[in-house]
Image: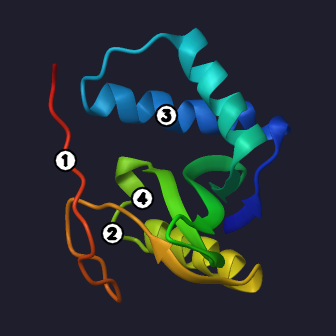
């Protein structure tokens, strides 16, 4: 059964599994110690929602709630990272994680939610585009 919960430090291993799977899938060289440090930082500095299927991690979203840098009276949410196991993609897990993060930010007073994605996301319009260059 698929469940969603707010992650805490006891979920470090579950989120590490998702990140390591993502790195392997995309041939990203990683250091397990660095991933562990990153996950602990995510859990300390950001909000994280974890999706589990019968207790096994299948997805997670890391997001933040912050002031608009141009209007400090306006709050907005921003997706920092999202991981969904490859066999769970196109099954609604990622969409549900995004929706739950949006709802949490809205409850906290946010008026917008920003995310970057390599494809069009239902309900979102293009505002800015993120680009990355290998150095």
Quarter assignment of residue 74: bottom right
Q: Residue at x 59, y 78 (%)?
A: 102
Q: Secondary structure at mark 4?
A: helix
Determine whether, in the image, residue 45 is placed left or right of residue 79: right
The residues tagged by marks 1 and 4 sit, at their Cα atoms, a distance apart of: 26 Å
Of 93 and 109, which appears nearest the observer?
Answer: 109
Quarter assignment of residue 63: bottom right
| Quarter of the figure that contains the C terminus | top left
Circles 3 and 2: CB distance less than 8 Å? no
Res 1 visible? no
Mark 1 or 4: the one toward you: 1
Mark 4, residue position: 88
Mark 3 or 4: the one toward you: 3
Q: Secondary structure at mark 3?
A: helix
Mark 1, residue position: 131
Precedes in sequence: disc 1 or disc 3:
3
Q: Position of residue 58 (x, y in %)?
A: 54, 51
Circles 1 and 3: CB distance less than 8 Å? no
């Amino acid at each position: 059964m698929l469940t969603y919960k707010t992650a805490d430090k006891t979920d470090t291993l579950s989120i590490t599994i998702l990140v390591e799977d993502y790195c392997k899938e995309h041939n990203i060289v990683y250091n397990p110690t660095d991933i562990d440090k990153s996950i602990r930082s995510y859990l300390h500095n950001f909000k994280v929602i974890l999706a589990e299927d019968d207790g096994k991690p299948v997805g997670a979203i890391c997001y933040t709630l912050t002031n608009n840098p141009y209007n400090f009276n306006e709050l907005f949410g921003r997706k920092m990272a999202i991981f969904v196991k490859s066999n769970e993609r196109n099954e609604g897990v990622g969409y549900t994680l995004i929706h739950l993060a949006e709802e949490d930010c809205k409850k906290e007073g946010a008026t917008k939610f920003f995310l970057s994605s390599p494809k069009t996301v239902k309900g979102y319009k293009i505002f800015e585009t993120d680009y990355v260059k290998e150095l």
